[in-house]
Image: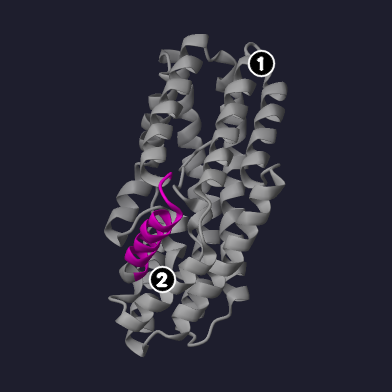
């Protein structure tokens, strides 16, 4: 389900974060290497959860290789168009929050399409997972959860400050250094957006528990049954059944789009030029990857 799992996809809410959202890397030179090795990297990540046996490992490698070929042929052109839209938007002195949110929505759609394409492969392996493998998965979840709690379940002010710092770092990768006025503006905007880490954590646990409760029921299930169950899990990832979480996320997305639009309107001509140049670098990588024969 997590093919090319792009961390923090829901938080990449601006033109400045678009390339990182789509390609998962902060530097253009790393994009091609990471993309070309994505099947092996993804196998390594998944194996860290499930500890595949030999047959499972071979099936996963084969399916990931096929997914990579499909993505190169079908999705890279879509990402190239999306980056071109981002470039045009970045060159404008006064983009609107609506334009940025529209770009974000298109990016999420590309991720949903990728996950949907990966489901048949996941459905073939899920029924073969043994109880010991599911136990290993639960233990890995708990290990990751402890780390998450230590980093994020602090005071609201601390979590907002930490999140703002991460966003600042990503923005400066594209714009270059932000001036003091822009930093104050960014902090004020993030204070307005706020942070509800307990709610985020509750959603994280919900997703994990649904996975851990669903997979044992699929032992020896046929592919159709397994795919239907995994499709429901994927839908719950992108469209949470928790109404309070959906409302919070929607508000955070809209407020963050407004914050990014406001920041871009304050950008100098050189900062906008830096942004366009960075996005063009990613576009060049995508075109080069499209031209490669895997």
For the point 56% across and 14% down, the residue is 128
Colour style of the rendered protein structure:
one colour
Classify the position of the C terminus by image quarter.
Answer: top left
SS of the residue under disc 2: helix
Q: Earlier in the sequence, mark 1 or mark 2?
A: 2
Q: Check residue 247 for magenta coloring.
A: no
Classify the position of the N terminus by image quarter.
Answer: top right
Q: Is residue 4 left or right of residue 107?
A: left
Q: Check residue 161 for magenta coloring.
A: yes
Q: Position of residue 9 (x, y in %)?
A: 50, 52
Q: Are marks 1 and 2 in contact (CB under 8 Å)?
A: no
Q: Position of residue 252 (x, y in %)?
A: 58, 61
| Residue labelled with disc 1 | 217
Name the front one of labels 1 and 2.
2
Say above or below: 102 vs 202. below
For the point 61% across and 41% down, the residue is 237
Q: Position of residue 21 (x, y in %)?
A: 46, 57
Q: Is residue 175 left or right of residue 248?
A: left
Neighbor class of circle 2 (other Cα within 10 Å; few <14, some 14-19, many 20+) is some
| Residue labelled with disc 2 | 187
Say above or below: 8 vs 12. above
Instruction: Work out whether residue 81 can be spotted.
Output: no
Neighbor class of circle 1 (other Cα within 10 Å; few <14, some 14-19, many 20+) is few
For the point 31% across and 81% down, the residue is 180
SS of the residue under disc 1: helix
Of residues 195 and 106, the one nearer the viewer is 195
For the point 62% across and 28% down, the residue is 210
Say above or below: 115 vs 183. above
The residues colored magenta run 153-171
């Amino acid at each position: 389900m997590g093919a090319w799992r792009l961390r923090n996809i829901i938080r990449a809410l601006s033109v400045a974060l678009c390339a990182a959202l789509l390609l998962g890397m902060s530097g253009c030179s790393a994009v091609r290497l990471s993309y070309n090795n994505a099947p092996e990297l993804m196998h390594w990540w998944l194996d860290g959860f499930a500890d595949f046996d030999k047959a499972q490992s071979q099936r996963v490698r084969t399916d990931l290789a096929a997914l990579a070929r499909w993505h190169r042929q079908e999705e890279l052109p879509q990402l190239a168009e999306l980056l071109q839209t981002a470039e045009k938007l970045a060159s404008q002195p006064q983009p609107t929050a609506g334009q940025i949110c529209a770009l974000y929505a298109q990016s999420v759609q590309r991720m949903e399409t990728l996950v949907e394409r990966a489901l048949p492969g996941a459905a073939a392996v899920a029924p073969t997972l043994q109880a010991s493998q599911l136990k290993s998965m639960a233990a890995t979840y708990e290990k990751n959860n402890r780390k998450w709690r230590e980093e994020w379940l602090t005071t609201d002010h601390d979590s907002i400050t930490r999140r703002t710092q991460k966003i600042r770092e990503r923005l400066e990768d594209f714009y270059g250094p932000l001036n003091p006025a822009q930093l104050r503006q960014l902090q004020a905007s993030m204070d307005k957006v706020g942070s509800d880490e307990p709610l985020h954590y509750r959603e994280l646990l919900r997703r994990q528990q649904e996975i851990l409760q669903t997979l044992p029921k699929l032992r020896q299930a046929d592919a159709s049954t397994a795919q239907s169950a995994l499709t429901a899990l994927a839908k719950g990832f992108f469209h949470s059944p928790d109404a309070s979480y959906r409302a919070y996320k929607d508000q955070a997305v809209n407020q963050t789009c407004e914050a990014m639009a406001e920041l871009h309107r304050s950008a100098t001509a050189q900062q906008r030029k830096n942004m366009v140049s960075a996005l063009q670098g990613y576009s060049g990588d995508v075109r080069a990857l499209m031209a490669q024969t895997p």
